[in-house]
């Protein structure tokens, strides 16, 4: 039976969508200095709505980068406290010419709303606010549990400010669990909770050879080439089958449970379809003997993202560059320790650095994998709430990516996260024609309402 | 005994230097579209002087790129014909802040003239013109041999127009030998002729994996990474000691003669000094068992110049790029055939392309090595002329680089080249503070005068 909060949400769907469109019109691109004021405007838009719906102590918190937003409502004595997280900043919209409708003019087509940030993450942020608004209305100006919000504007640029804030304001942010709405459904109409993330160690290997760029005709055969040195070392880090060759790299890897692996096998996943429609390569790669989901969710990987240096314009230049770099990252799984892995990685590179070359490794980021136990009361309540909305059992998945804030909630605040997201795999996150399926926006609001009501019972 | 042409040249040194400064003030940077008119102005400056000194049929020849300049004087019946080559275009001057005096305001310091193009190649071009001027004056308005000039404005951008022109105008350019003034002395005060160049095959390997850039968290472990594929393949092309592993790569390599190797050993070359002052690396690299000069002049090499693709800005982005490339070149030695080498290289890459990756190889340029026999009459006369000027025996060296026009003279026109250059190893070609040692400018003029007089005897 629908609560009066659910009824209120249903009655106000069109208005909620209209508000979301207003938010989507603000180009809050956090990486672009020219959009700094827009990011600020988006923060104010969100803060104003938090005040309007009855949240208290609403603050726009200045940081070195873009502002954080805090709000709370803490009058449900004896009930749990949730820390709601989302972000109001968006990725750049480029390449603009690939958008069918302008990225900051939200447009409805086929039950979807198209705009930069539609699903990542303004649409999902707005679900949280609208669920709280409906709960407040449906429960006579009160909420069934205690609610805190911490909302950031730097998710797309590394999230440094929230990381610092979490460390500084542990007491203020104290809660029983976090609700993180920034993930997706495994398939359309399939209620999904994400319960595992891979960790990440992201490095840049800087190689130096000669003191200056040299002509490859004059000096080829005598001067060390930092590109070749990087190629030599990186080729030794991983074999052609995807096995990482750093000694001890796999020693702490904890495999998923048998039950988890069994559940993954039941997910609606067709490898050939995935290869064709998502990856689009001739074949898939990775360690033999593991399924795609296992490889991308629960096996560590090593990738090269770019190799700056030398001559990269069109045409030919015969230079032996003095310097070159490689951006190399490793995805980690439970229970690999990022510091231990980094130590082994650095030792391996040192050992294999070719003669004549100096190699220095810069660490861009470093964080462990994170797995949420599925038997805590918050995951249970979330599962039931989604069942009520979708009339289907919720599946537990992992993600191969990393959400640093979830890792921080867990490791800094000992706070379990409920990663309840309503995106779809083809929503074009970070790409042109980003969209959010409008029925999923409404289901998300209803799921959060029911979830919070269950915890307040 | 000095001829009256030599005396004339000595009497006019200051004027010659003044004219060179005027030419150096024209920023004829061939790669920069905004300097197109300056390049044209430099061509006109040179053509005007050719007319003034008595050359005939002076033409500024339009091309798809920058103009060529032709001129001749063909009234020395029964005497040999020389084709004088040089170029009037220059490299960009950037980085400007590293110049001690502005690159296009020629400045004298310590007997050097500092300016972009001072030695490469305006100063050496001007030696040719001033030698001809002095010969004309010293021989009563006649020259001791027949002279043609072909001067280009695209040497620094690939020289496509002159390559096409040579193929089209073989008859017009017909000569007994070419004089190429664009090289350097092996050491200060050491008369030097360059008699060998390495060939070049310059390629770009383009690797494609997924159909679009993918997130390394979501897809790492399933999507092929074109960077890793390039690294795998390139690491197999060459071992850590510099040996190229393509089957048959060395089968046609012709070693220098024993006499040549013996002569190289007598050259004033200190490996440790070279390492410290020219290369500046911790150690030198290359095939064991070969000297530095052997490795850089007469052994083939393989280098990576740049690897475009993926994320190369500052910081971290977790992308598995859809595409990445590697600019890879090979320097060839006698008697390696560029087509044969390219065929073997392509087969090797095809064989080692990892699964899931498409690799295509683009060829940017391709030309054989070139060795000039030292017993032709032109080399002999050049040797004697330089001995008269420097009072020392001329040394024969090779260069590890490629001068495509010399290869074209040899292969298209069957024309031996005399590569007589007066630069110094520390003249900062292609770098800030390019200079030309003024006494070498004057010695160059005198050497050419004496060289041509000997051939006219």
Image (cartoon, coloured by chain):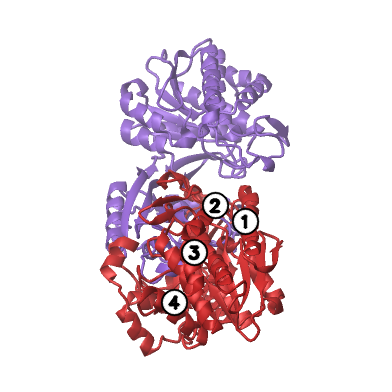
Chain colours: A purple, B red
Few, some or many residues within 10 Å of mark 1 (<14, 14–19, 20+)? some
- State the image coordinates of residue B121 (x, y, percent, origin top left): 51, 62
Find the distance from the CA under tag 4 to the CA under tag 3. 23 Å
Kindly check if marks 1 and 2 are in contact, taking CB atoms under 8 A apart as contact. Answer: yes
In the image, residue B381 lies at what x, y percent? 48, 83
Q: Could you classify mark 3 by the number of other residues whose Cα lies within 10 Å: few (under 14), some (14-19), or many (20 or more)? A: many
Residue at numbered disc 4 = B193
The residue where tag 1 is placed is: B45
Q: Do discs 1 and 2 belong to a common subunit?
A: yes
Considering depth in this image, is A145 or B372 the residue closer to the camera? B372
Q: CA distance from mark 4 to mark 2?
A: 29 Å
The label nearer to you, 4 versus 2, is 2
Mark 4 or 2, nearer chain start:
2
Of the image marks 1 and 2, the number of the one nearer the N terminus: 2
* Residue B234: % across, % down: 46, 68
Q: Kindly identify which chain the residue marked by label 4 belongs to.
A: B
Of the residues tagged 2 and 3, which is closer to the observer?
A: 2
Q: Is residue B125 left or right of residue A439?
A: left
Chain hosting mark 1: B
Q: Are marks 4 and 2 in contact (CB under 8 Å)?
A: no
Residue bearing the label numbered 2: B22
Q: CA distance from mark 4 to mark 1?
A: 29 Å
Q: Residue at label 3?
A: A318
Chain letter belonging to callout 3: A
Q: Are marks 4 and 2 on the same chain?
A: yes
Label 4 Cα neighbours within 10 Å, binned few <14 / some 14-19 / many ≥20: many
Position of residue A456 relative to residue B58, above or below, is above
């Amino acid at each position: 039976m629908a609560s009066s909060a659910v009824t209120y949400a249903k009655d106000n769907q069109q208005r909620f969508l209209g508000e979301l469109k207003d938010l989507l019109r603000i180009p809050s691109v956090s990486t672009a200095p020219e959009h700094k004021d827009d990011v600020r405007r988006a923060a104010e838009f969100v803060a104003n709505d938090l005040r309007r719906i009855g949240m208290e102590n609403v603050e726009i918190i200045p940081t070195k980068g873009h502002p954080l937003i805090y709000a709370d409502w803490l009058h449900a004595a004896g009930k749990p406290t949730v820390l709601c997280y989302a972000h109001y900043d968006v990725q750049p919209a480029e390449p603009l010419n690939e958008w069918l409708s302008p990225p900051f003019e939200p447009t409805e087509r086929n039950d979807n709303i198209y705009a930069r940030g539609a699903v990542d993450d303004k649409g999902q942020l707005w679900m949280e606010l609208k669920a709280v608004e409906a709960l407040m209305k449906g429960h006579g100006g009160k909420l069934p549990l205690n609610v805190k919000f911490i909302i950031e504007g730097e998710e797309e640029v590394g999230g440094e400010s929230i990381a610092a804030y979490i460390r500084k304001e542990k007491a203020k942010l104290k809660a029983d669990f976090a609700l993180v709405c920034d993930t997706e459904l495994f398939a359309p109409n399939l209620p999904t909770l994400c319960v595992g993330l891979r960790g990440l160690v992201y490095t840049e290997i800087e190689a130096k050879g000669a003191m200056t760029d040299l002509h490859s005709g004059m000096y080829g055969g005598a001067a060390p080439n930092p590109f070749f040195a990087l190629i030599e070392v990186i080729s030794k880090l991983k074999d052609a089958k995807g096995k990482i060759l750093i000694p001890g790299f796999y020693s702490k890897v904890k495999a998923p449970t048998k039950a988890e692996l069994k559940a993954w096998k039941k997910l609606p996943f067709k490898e050939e379809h995935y290869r064709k429609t998502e990856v689009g390569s001739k074949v898939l790669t990775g360690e033999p003997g593991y399924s795609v989901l296992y490889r991308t969710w629960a096996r560590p990987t090593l990738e090269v993202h770019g190799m700056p240096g030398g001559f990269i314009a069109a045409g030919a230049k015969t230079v032996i560059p003095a310097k070159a770099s490689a951006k190399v990252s490793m995805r980690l799984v439970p229970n690999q320790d990022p510091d231990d892995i980094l130590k082994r990685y650095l030792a391996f590179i040192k050992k294999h650095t070719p003669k004549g070359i100096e190699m220095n490794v810069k660490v861009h980021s470093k964080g462990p994998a994170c797995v949420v136990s599925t038997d805590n009361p918050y995951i249970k309540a979330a599962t039931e709430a989604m069942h009520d909305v979708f009339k289907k059992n919720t599946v537990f998945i992992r993600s191969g990516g990393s959400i640093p804030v979830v890792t921080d909630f867990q490791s800094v605040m000992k706070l379990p996260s409920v990663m309840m997201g309503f995106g779809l795999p083809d929503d074009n996150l970070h790409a042109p024609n980003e969209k959010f399926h409008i029925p999923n926006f409404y289901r998300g609001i209803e799921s959060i309402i029911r979830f919070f009501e269950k915890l307040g019972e």
